[in-house]
Amino acid sequence: MAAAAIAYLAIARSRRKRAKKQPIVFPDIGSPITSAMVMYDSHDISLDNKKIAEIINQDSEATIAEAENVPLTHGLFPLVRVKSTVPFVVVINDSPEAAQEIQEIADMAERENQLPKDIIDKLRRCDARLDVSSARSPVKIAVQAITVEATTDLDPIKPPVLKVLRSLEDSTHGLTFDCVNGGWPTQ
């Protein structure tokens, strides 16, 4: 037990010394807050970050979308960086948690009569989503911690953003949920 405690202290000291010597670099992956979601059935369409960038670039002259693979400690993080008057990022979220959240959103929409039954049925078939968030995420770096302030400056109903959302929605045969304003932009 004492040997484990000594080893732990040695590792902790070593990390602190390294942290003082090397600055902590936080990857530029956008805001952790999702401003909008385009929910879709991944059995109907196969997407990757290159395909999403292609869809966005085909449908808009005012925006430029670039597929990126941002290196993280445990591998690459694929995203699409959209450069326009309102910069944002798009990330594929096909995790089991995302599928569960989509079902919860469908339940809420049904309970609150937010959508017609056929649209709710379509939503229930969705098992993946495109998370759209601000490209700007304030990050504060200290020796002991990285703090990400969870804010967003991306409003999904702004015309340049809404145009891209509609393009993604059409291409995926999906449904868009506005997380900032809390609703379904004119279905």
Image (spheres, rainbow, N blue to C red):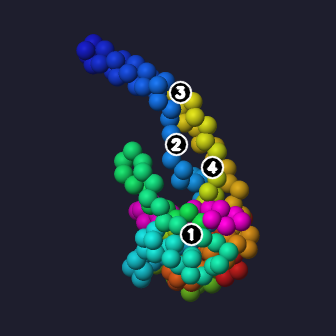
- 128 to 87, vertically: above or below: below
Q: Earlier in the sequence, mark 1 or mark 4?
A: 1
> Is residue 121 in view?
no
Which residue is rendered at x = 42% and y = 82% of the image?
44
x and y percentages locating residue 34 in the rendered image: 60, 59
Q: Which residue was labeled with disc 4?
A: 137
**Quadrant location of the N terminus?**
top left
Vertical side of 93 occupied by 122: above or below: below
- In 3D space, how far apart are the residues under numbered discs 1 and 2 (Cα atoms)? 22 Å
Farthest residue, direction bottom: 118
Q: For the residues marked 1 and 4, what is the alpha-carbon distance in whole angstroms?
A: 18 Å
For mark 1, what is the residue? Answer: 65
Report the residue marked by disc 2. 26
Residues at marks 1 and 4 touching, judged by CB atoms closer than 8 Å? no
Q: Is residue 84 left or right of residue 94?
A: right
The residue beneath circle 3 is 143
